[in-house]
Image: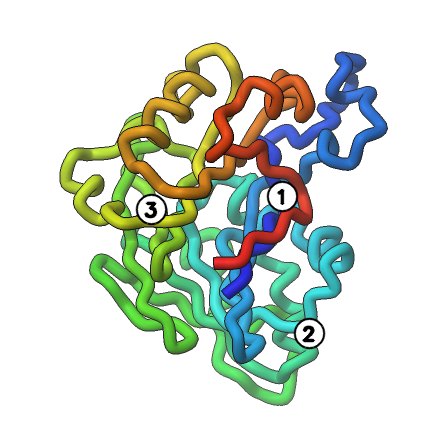
């Protein structure tokens, strides 16, 4: 499969509105980060989307996306959920209902705030046509076994996801000991790295690197970064098995 980073940025995106720091003024495309999301493209062309950022439409146009076959939600904060209405385009293109998967509280939030999207297919495709599924154990999506990995985002329990030997872990502040068992043997890890200084609900650069060493994946990619981390300065400091992610980065898994 192939993973494409749709957005490597934090909730504010980069450049940040009103900021004139070196990162925000940079002309390098790797310093222009839309809100955090990724897609997994399988060998048969099916697409599993991880989160729907508010920038989903622009991300889809940039990556020439033609379909979405399923969505895995890590949690329901605005920068990971509020592009849900843009799934309408893929329902229209393919005349299909798109299944959504997440933990119970996240699915309940979607039902309460975006209930209009949860509909059965009919002749009317001007709204998203989605189906919500609660998952609390390994499940099958597009022929792949997906393992939810519980992690902490401050005081909230959210999900990272493992698909084969790929793990996608955003917005993490702590990994419970029981979840480390689900990470054994991972080869490709995408992991939260908000900024240089500590934060109550996200790991910092030093904390992210410490988790990377414990998980021991062969390839590690930093995501969900603020404008405080300039791409070239950051990449120069990283060990060989860690790279700074950027919008459009593709990984073969």
The quarter of the picture where residue 112 lies is bottom left
The quarter of the picture where residue 176 lies is top left
Q: Residues within 10 Å of mark 3 (few under 14, many from 20)?
A: many
Find residue 50 and report its horizontal and vertical position in percent: 49, 54
Which numbered disc flags the more N-terminal residue, 3 or 2?
2
Q: Residue placed at 31% from the left, 68% from the top?
A: 145
Find residue 10 and report its horizontal and vertical position in percent: 57, 31
Q: Residue placed at 80% from the left, 31% from the top?
A: 28
Find residue 106 and report its horizontal and vertical position in percent: 36, 50
Q: Which residue is mark 2?
A: 126
Which numbered disc flags the more N-terminal residue, 3 or 1?
1
Q: Nearer the viewer, residue 90 or 25?
A: 25
Q: Which residue is mark 3?
A: 159
Q: Which residue is mark 1?
A: 7
Distance, label 3 to label 1, CA atoms, is 18 Å
Q: Classify 161 as above or below 175.
A: below
Q: Residue placed at 36% from the left, 52% from the top?
A: 161
Residue 38 shows in the view = yes
Query: In the image, 110: left or right of 64?
Result: left
Helix, strand or loop status at disc 2: loop
Marks 3 and 2 close (CB-CB < 8 Å): no
């Amino acid at each position: 499969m192939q993973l494409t980073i749709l957005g490597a940025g934090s909730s504010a995106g980069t450049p940040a509105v009103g900021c004139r720091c070196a990162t925000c003024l940079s002309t390098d495309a790797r310093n222009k980060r839309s809100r955090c999301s990724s897609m997994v493209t399988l060998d048969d062309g099916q697409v599993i989307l991880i989160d729907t950022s508010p920038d989903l439409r622009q991300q889809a146009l940039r990556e020439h996306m033609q379909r979405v076959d399923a969505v895995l939600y890590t949690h329901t904060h605005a920068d990971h959920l509020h592009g849900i209405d843009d799934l309408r385009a893929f329902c229209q293109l393919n005349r299909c209902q798109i299944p959504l998967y997440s933990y119970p509280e996240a699915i309940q939030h979607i039902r309460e705030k975006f209930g209009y999207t949860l509909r059965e297919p009919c002749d009317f495709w001007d709204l998203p046509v989605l189906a919500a599924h609660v998952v609390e154990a390994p499940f099958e999506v597009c022929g792949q076994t997906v393992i939810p990995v519980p992690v902490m985002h401050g005081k909230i329990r959210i999900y990272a996801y493992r698909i084969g030997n790929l793990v996608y872990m955003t917005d993490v502040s702590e990994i419970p000991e029981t979840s480390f068992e689900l990470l054994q043997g991972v080869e490709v890890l995408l992991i939260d790295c908000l900024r240089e200084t500590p934060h109550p609900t996200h790991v910092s650069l030093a904390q992210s690197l410490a988790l990377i060493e414990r998980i021991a994946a062969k390839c590690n990619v930093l995501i969900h970064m603020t404008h405080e981390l300039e791409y070239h300065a950051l990449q120069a400091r990283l060990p060989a098995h860690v790279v700074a992610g950027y919008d459009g980065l593709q990984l073969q898994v």
